[in-house]
Image (tube, rainbow, N blue to C red):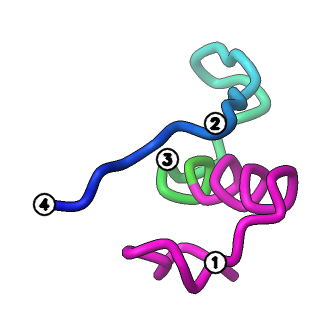
Amino acid sequence: MAEAYIVAATRTAGGRKGGRLAGWHPADLAASVLDSLVDRTGVDPAQIEDSSWVA
């Protein structure tokens, strides 16, 4: 089994019910975080096993 390593972390903005993030689908919000991590670390998206979220 392959090992996974955490190389960077980021977070989403906090939100309130009916607030600014109300129109965001959770999958879109997660994709935004993952895209940000790829950009910040410079990792090759092809090296990520499940890269279907990479735009």
With 39 as the anchor, is 51 left or right in this view? left
Three-letter code for the amino acid on which mark 3 is drawn: Pro
With 17 as the anchor, is 35 left or right in this view? right
Q: Earlier in the sequence, mark 2 or mark 1?
A: 2
- Tag nearer the camera, 4 or 2: 4
Quadrant of residue 14 in the image?
A: top right
With 4 as the anchor, is 52 left or right in this view? right
**Residue at left offset 73%, top offset 50%:** 37
Give the residues drawn in magenta, as a range: 31-55
**Residue at left offset 74%, top offset 61%:** 38
Three-letter code for the amino acid on which mark 2 is drawn: Ala
CA–CA distance between discs 4 and 3? 29 Å
CA–CA distance between discs 3 and 1? 21 Å
According to the picture, the residue beneath numbered tag 1 turns out to be: 45
Three-letter code for the amino acid on which mark 4 is drawn: Met
According to the picture, the residue beneath numbered tag 3 turns out to be: 26
CA–CA distance between discs 4 and 2? 38 Å
Q: CB under 8 Å between callouts 3 and 2?
A: no
How many neighbours does mark 4 have within 10 angstroms: few (below 14), some (14-19), or many (20 or more)? few
Instruction: Kindly state the secondary structure of the residue where label 1 is placed.
Output: helix
Q: Which mark is residue 22?
A: 2
8 is within the stretch colored magenta:
no
Q: Which of marks 4 and 1 is nearer the N terminus?
A: 4
CA–CA distance between discs 3 and 2? 10 Å
Instruction: Kindly state the secondary structure of the residue where label 4 is placed.
Output: loop
